[in-house]
Image: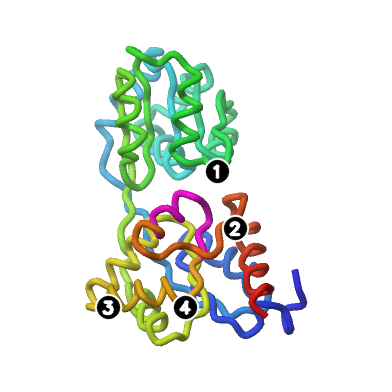
Amino acid sequence: MSNAATGPLAGRRIAVLEARLTDALASLIERAGAEVVRAPALRERPLDAASEVAAFCDTLETGGFAAVVFLTGVGANALLSEAERLGRLDTTLEALRGAMTVCRGPKPVARLARQNVPTSIAVPEPHTTAEVIKALESLDLSGQRLGLVHYGERNDALAEALLANHVQLVELCLYEWVLPEDVAPLEHLVQGIIDGKIDAVVFTSKVQARHLLDIAQRLGALEKLRTELATRTVVVAVGPTTAEMLAANGMRPAVVPTKPKMGPMVTALIEHFAKRT
């Protein structure tokens, strides 16, 4: 990276909406010389799904799933935590070790590996729904039962694609993404963007964008925010799924890394501003 004091990000104000890895992402940007404006845009709220998990484990432990799909590490962790609370962790892990497991991205792979559960199919980058569907097409799932552990909201596109292929789908939603309890940082960010005080906004998920727009709507500033993000403020998306959502709302990202990870994203952000100097 360039010298922080004189590099492309020196003196820039970059907004970060990441919630779980806020400090890690902020540190990467700050080391490049920018000032980071932190405005976490979501929190993960557990759902009461004890009966659903019990039924899921019943099917899993009797070999009833042709495959089990984990879309996030948080979802995998939530399933294992609930299984432990139900006193079924050992039998659940034993069943998973003998099952066909499909993981979207490295985080669920790592979470399962911590329990010595191998991943049968690791969905390749950029880890979008399209890659998951393509990976599952390699399996003959028509007419078979598949367990799908969602993330903070139901992946409708994936579920509908599987159902259209006559898959018997058993779905788990163990947590949901909601606005943070304190939305003041998001409100201040909306105003800062409108006032031209933010040079770039970094989105690491599409729900962050949706929540920022929701806050702007509440403030009666939605169109002003959209205009600013479409014309002056640099919009950064970690990957294609987030980029598509932003573009659909008239905020086409200027920066999308070739690899959907924080490090390459920050590098791409630096390169973008380097071209403007």
Q: Secondary structure at mark 1?
A: loop
- Mark 4, residues whose alpha carbon is within 10 Å: few (<14), some, or many (≥20)? some
* Pick the front one: 257 or 212: 257
Above or below, 238 against 101 in this view is below
Q: Secondary structure at mark 2?
A: helix
Is 91 magenta? The answer is no
User: Earlier along the polypeptide chain: callout 1 or callout 2?
Assistant: 1
Q: Position of residue 80 (x, y in %)?
A: 43, 35
Residue marked by disc 3: 221
Residue marked by disc 4: 232
> Residue farthest to the right?
3
Q: Mark on residue 38?
A: none
- Tell me the kind of residue under disc 2: Met
User: Earlier along the polypeptide chain: callout 2 or callout 3?
Assistant: 3
Q: Position of residue 16 (x, y in %)?
A: 49, 69
Q: Residue at x 39, y 17 (%)?
A: 65
Q: Are marks 1 and 3 in contact (CB under 8 Å)?
A: no
Residue marked by disc 1: 126
- Tell me the kind of residue under disc 1: Pro
Q: Please identify the dominant SS of the magenta region.
A: helix
- Mark 1, residues whose alpha carbon is within 10 Å: few (<14), some, or many (≥20)? some
The CA distance from mark 3 to mark 4 is: 16 Å
- Residue 60 horizontal side relative to residue 138, left or right: left
User: Earlier along the polypeptide chain: callout 4 or callout 1?
Assistant: 1
Magenta-highlighted residues: 236-246
Above or below, 63 against 157 in this view is above
- Residue 43 horizontal side relative to residue 256, left or right: left
Q: Name the image quarter holding the C terminus.
A: bottom right
Residue marked by disc 2: 262
Viewer-nearest of discs 4 and 2: 4
Q: Position of residue 1 (x, y in %)?
A: 75, 69
Residue 62 occupies quadrant: top left
